[in-house]
Amino acid sequence: MKILKTGLIVVGAATVFFAITEAVQSPDIQEEHKEAYQETFDKNVAKVYTIKALSIPENIDFAGESVPLTDPDIHERLDRELLVNTYWQSNALLLMKRANKYFPVIEPILKEEGVPDDFKYLAVIESGLTQAVSPANAVGFWQLLKGTGRDLGLEINSNVDERYHIEKSTRAACQYLKESKRDFGSWTLAAAAYNAGRAGIARQQERQKVKDYYDLLLGEETGRYVFRILALKEIMSNPYEYGFKFEESDLYRHIPTKKVKVDTAVDDFPDFAAKYGINYKILKIHNPWLREAHLNNASGKAYYVDIPEEGYYQ
């Protein structure tokens, strides 16, 4: 905390900026005092809170595919997303904290499925690594629609919705991405198709008579999509270069679990959780795909429920 000569108590750069700016612009401040307030602003605020242009990396790629940064349009679009995501500091820092918790789950699945590691950042921009539900009712880390999820082999009903299952939904997303790579021959276009749909990308390729993502004129969302992935990849891979400072202890922890087989109906999951020394809330945190407090399971299907290892919630 720093006390300025004007008597303002500074608790952060934003506080300084808004307090002094408001004072300078206020008609109630006598003219002779405005100069003093402006001088305080110039000497203090500019030192502690500087918005600066960012350097664009000389070379950047997505999934091993080069980004043509010598094209001025491509350069500007990447610059936009770097600026937006760097200076939306609270969101970027939250994403880094969550990534430490969830990337250890996602990364090995991508590797097993033969999908480039960069696609973990697609999940970041889709959901912020939360079990989000979009206005169109796309669900989970990978924002899968009900029909798409079922086409990819996920179980979706009132009891169970595997779009919320991080491991299974990641494998489903990998299946979709690999099919798109097969169709388009490019991981970059596979990423764009994840947003716009394969038919949507193919239609624009035919209409515009070009094939490459960076040559296509697309709508606002899909046009920004790959650049948002690139920006988050760059910032989250090099956080200190973009002004983010944190310790390992500041990041959210991945909590190891053991899998418990369930092949019968479960009448009451709060009681089920209590048998393993946890409560219903913790059970749901680790198994958001269980949508109700019971499981019908008339078919006797085998499910595997994640139970956190002991010692993490005490």
Image (spheres, rainbow, N blue to C red):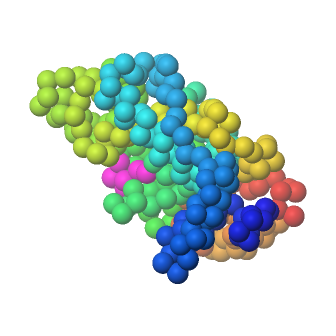
Q: Do we see residue 242 in this rendering?
A: yes
Front residue of 299 and 23: 23
Give the quadrant of residue 301.
bottom right
**Quadrant of the image occupied by residue 233:** top right
Looking at the rendering, in which quadrant would you find the N terminus?
bottom right
Residue 222 sits above or below residue 272 on the image: above
Q: What residue is drawn where x is 79% and y is 44%?
A: 247
Please tell me whether residue 56 is drawn above or below residue 299 in the rendered image: above
Q: Quadrant of the C terminus?
A: bottom right
User: Per the image, is 67 magenta?
Assistant: no
> Eyeballing the image, is 41 above or below 78?
below
Q: Does 72 sit above or below residue 20?
A: above
Looking at the rendered structure, the number of numbered marks drawn on it comes to 0
For the point 74% across and 71% down, which residue is it?
7
Residue 159 position within the rendered picture, expressed as x and y whole percent measured from the top left: 51, 66
Q: Where are the magenta residues, as a range?
A: 143-148
